[in-house]
């Protein structure tokens, strides 16, 4: 094995998972090639639990006639709860004041009441509820060195299934840069508040914050440079042998991480080969990208403009079938974004959410909540207006919207504000308000969504069953 470990001898024990003297700068090497390693316990203990097995086997798979898409939109700081829940249940329901902007897509909407994320009912007001939003797990309390969400986010499980069909397996988007430092009020690193998508227990996925760079990624995926693909594929081929040998010599938890890492490498290699081989399965965009759609070169200064551009990029990615899985964060946990651009609002989001039942703060909180729902309605409407085959992109999508807590003042993870838009290719029973028994697991919804997406998942995190009434 040819491993560069910064001139340190590496002693690996096949039967032990103790910390090993493996340098963080270790590279996997082949002839004229080098590839960085993922984070391993052999470099620094993280207390990670084993990542769950990958959900889908893509060998021999064929794309669906109508591609199914899934997105998750996260809103920080909860909602004004007395203005959120619709009146009536089933198909006989009336939209609440917060949800009125969704009137035009009501028939494509599910409003879900009494779901909760039990694993986030610990620790602190925000960070556990943000990083655990799509994992339904409890994150490790950390000051920043040993990040661990103890699971894998639902979107990445979906990406395992659909990623073989598209150039980008998933797309992670946001507005706020990663927040660093420690929140001394609760003893958690603020990094946890910047991520909802996790490829593994210790691997939060980086988000793209610039709409123009998102467009460039989509455009490059649709117009790959043929000259680089052979070189990249050769690099992967040359280091995989070294990686497999190292994996066999690591402890159990690190072998799990290396399995996940190597699966990602193999997936990239397969997609590169698929683009080169000229076969009938070669990916083609469903709709050609037009360079005139490219956002301005400078990142928008205005929050409103940047949010709309990001939602446009999600719609464009789904319309072209460049990816079928996406996450978007309107803001990081404890977001203090100033919403004074809204008439009647004078303060920041986080401060306003701590309303203490003050009538003026509650009024402003409601205006902020409604604005977020308006943006969600904008995306659903845009997808609805994108025609494909006998329906629309929205018909073949599932767009989740929600927050990791109910009310910003109480920080409660009970009865979360959760919406699901789009009929998932006819698999989702939309046009309903479904109210469940108190503290029904949010993970039950995720199982239903994964099954609608085509996965054979029977469980996820702390799920107890498929959420009834969601699937047709």
Image (cartoon, rainbow, N blue to C red):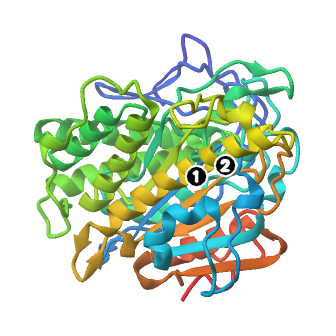
Q: Is 207 displayed left or right of 396 in the figure?
A: right
Decide: few, some or many residues near mark 1? Use Cα within 10 Å; few <14, some 14-19, many ≥20.
Answer: many
Secondary structure under tag 1 reads helix
Quadrant in which the C terminus is drawn:
bottom right
Residue 98 in the image: state x and y as whole percent: 62, 59
Camera-nearest residue between 236 and 155: 155
Camera-nearest residue between 198 and 427: 427
Q: Please, is residue 426 above or below residue 180 in the view?
A: below
Which residue sits at x=74%, y=31%? Answer: 351
| Numbered marks: total | 2
Name the residue furthest top.
7
Image disc number at residue 340: none
Camera-nearest residue between 322 and 424: 424
Residue 107 in the image: state x and y as whole percent: 48, 79
Question: Gap in Å between the C-alphas at discs 2 and 1?
Answer: 6 Å
Q: Which image quarter: residue 400? A: bottom right
Residue 119 in the image: state x and y as whole percent: 82, 54
Camera-nearest residue between 193 and 352: 352
Can the viewer see residue 90 in this picture? yes
Secondary structure under tag 2 reads helix
Q: Which residue is mark 1?
A: 370
Q: Is 310 displayed left or right of 436 in the figure?
A: left
Which residue sits at x=43%, y=84%? Answer: 426
Can the viewer see residue 128 in this picture? no
Q: Which image quarter: residue 113? A: bottom right
Decide: few, some or many residues near mark 2? Use Cα within 10 Å; few <14, some 14-19, many ≥20.
Answer: many
Q: Which residue is mark 2?
A: 366
Marks 2 and 1 in Cβ contact (< 8 Å)? yes
Q: Please, is residue 189 above or below residue 120 in the view?
A: above
Residue 470 in the image: state x and y as whole percent: 61, 81
């Amino acid at each position: 094995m040819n491993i560069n470990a910064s001139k340190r001898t590496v002693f690996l024990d096949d039967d032990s998972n103790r910390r090993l003297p493996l340098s963080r700068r270790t590279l996997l090497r082949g002839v004229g090639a080098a590839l960085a390693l993922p984070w391993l316990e052999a470099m620094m203990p993280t207390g990670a639990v084993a990542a769950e097995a990958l959900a889908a086997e893509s060998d021999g798979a064929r794309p669906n006639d109508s591609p199914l898409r899934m997105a998750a939109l996260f809103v920080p700081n909860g909602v004004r709860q007395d203005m959120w829940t619709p009146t009536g249940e089933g198909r006989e329901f009336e939209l609440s004041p917060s949800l009125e902007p969704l009137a035009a897509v009501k028939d494509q909407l599910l409003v879900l009441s009494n779901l909760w994320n039990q694993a986030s009912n610990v620790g602190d007001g925000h960070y556990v509820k943000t990083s655990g939003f799509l994992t339904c797990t409890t994150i490790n309390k950390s000051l920043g060195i040993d990040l661990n969400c103890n699971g894998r986010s639902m979107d990445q499980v979906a990406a395992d299934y659909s990623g073989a069909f598209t150039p980008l397996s998933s797309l992670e988007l946001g507005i706020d840069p990663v927040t660093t430092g420690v929140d001394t009020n609760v003893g958690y690193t603020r990094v946890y508040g910047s991520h909802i998508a996790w490829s593994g227990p210790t691997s939060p996925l980086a988000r793209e914050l610039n709409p123009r760079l998102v467009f460039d990624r989509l455009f490059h995926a649709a117009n790959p440079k043929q000259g680089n693909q052979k070189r990249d594929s050769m690099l992967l081929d040359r280091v995989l042998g070294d990686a497999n040998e190292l994996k066999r010599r690591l402890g159990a938890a690190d072998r799990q991480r290396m399995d996940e890492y190597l699966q990602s490498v193999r997936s990239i290699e397969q997609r590169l080969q698929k683009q080169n081989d000229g076969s009938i399965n070669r990916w083609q965009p469903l709709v050609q990208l037009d360079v005139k759609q490219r956002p301005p070169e400078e990142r928008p200064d205005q929050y409103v403009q940047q949010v709309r551009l990001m939602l446009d990029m999600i719609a464009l990615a789904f319309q072209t079938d460049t990816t079928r899985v996406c996450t978007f964060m309107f803001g990081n946990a404890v977001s203090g974004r100033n919403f004074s651009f809204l008439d009647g609002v004078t303060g920041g989001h986080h401060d306003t959410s701590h309303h203490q039942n003050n009538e003026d703060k509650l009024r402003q909180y409601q205006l902020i909540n409604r604005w977020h729902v308006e943006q969600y309605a904008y995306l659903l409407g845009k997808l609805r207006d994108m025609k494909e085959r006998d329906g629309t992109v929205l018909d073949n999508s599932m767009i989740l919207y929600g927050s990791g807590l109910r009310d910003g003042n109480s920080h409660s993870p009970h009865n979360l504000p959760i919406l699901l838009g789009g009929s998932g290719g006819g698999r989702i029973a939309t046009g309903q308000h479904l109210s469940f028994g108190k503290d029904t697991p949010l993970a039950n919804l995720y199982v239903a969504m994964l099954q609608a997406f085509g996965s054979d998942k029977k469980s996820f995190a702390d799920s107890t069953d498929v959420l009834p009434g969601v699937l047709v």
